Image (spheres, rainbow, N blue to C red):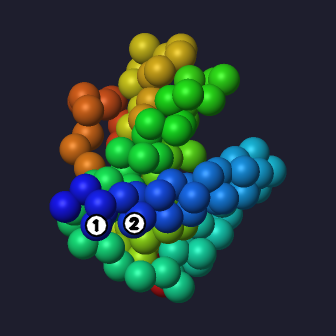
């Protein structure tokens, strides 16, 4: 079983690493809405993954993202997933904001994720592709 899954995991890891700098560039240089639209457009041409493959992709993205100097970014993780999976590209993106403000007072997630906590305001961006 491991020998069968290993090449797929390595391929997914290379895809994630290939898209990381692109997604980060979009996130930093384009506005929020435009960067999400670019990620969705990239993902629209990809294949839809199985639930198992998508969970593995999400874990890989998170494992790599956490190791970056900024400690990770939820918008970047969502954009990566949308860029690499057609199903994710078609999902609603949520952004929650807490009125307490400060670091870690907001979070972005896709509809297939569970919101980690309650937020004072939640915005949603449905896919228009």
| Residue 115 image offset from top left, x and y in percent | 26, 40
- SS for dot 1: helix
The quarter in which the N terminus is drawn is bottom left
Along the line of sight, which residue is nearer the eye, 97 or 83?
83
| Residue 122 image offset from top left, x and y in percent | 36, 43
| Residue 23 image offset from top left, x and y in percent | 66, 55
Tell me if I can see residue 12 in this picture: no
Contact flag, marks 2 and 1 (Cβ < 8 Å): yes
Q: Is residue 49 above or below residue 112?
A: below
Residue farthest to the front, as pictured: 3
Left or right: 20, with 127 as reference point: right
Q: Is residue 72 above or below residue 2?
A: above
Mark 1 lies on residue = 4
Q: Is residue 90 above or below residue 70?
A: below
Q: How many marks?
A: 2
The residue shown at (66%, 23%) is: 69
Quarter of the view holding residue 71: top right
Left or right: 85, with 76 as reference point: left
Q: Is residue 113 above or below residue 85?
A: above
| Residue 101 image offset from top left, x and y in percent | 50, 17
Residue farthest to the right, as pictured: 29
What is the C-alpha distance between the residues marked 2 and 1?
A: 8 Å
- The label number, if any, that marks residue 8 in the structure image: 2
Along the line of sight, which residue is nearer the eye, 49 or 41?
49
Along the line of sight, which residue is nearer the eye, 15 or 93?
15
The residue mark sitting in front, 2 or 1, is 1
């Amino acid at each position: 079983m491991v020998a069968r899954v290993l090449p797929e995991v390595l391929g997914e890891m290379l895809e994630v690493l290939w898209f990381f700098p692109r997604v980060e560039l979009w996130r930093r240089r384009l506005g929020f809405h435009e960067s999400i639209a670019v990620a969705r457009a990239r993902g629209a041409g990809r294949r839809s993954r199985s639930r198992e493959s998508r969970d593995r992709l999400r874990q890989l993205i998170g494992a790599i993202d956490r190791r970056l100097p900024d400690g990770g970014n939820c918008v970047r993780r969502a954009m990566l997933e949308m860029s690499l999976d057609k199903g994710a590209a078609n999902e609603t993106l949520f952004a929650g904001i807490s009125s307490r403000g400060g670091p870690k007072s907001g979070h972005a997630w896709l509809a297939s994720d569970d919101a980690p906590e309650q937020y004072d305001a939640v915005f949603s961006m449905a896919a228009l592709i």
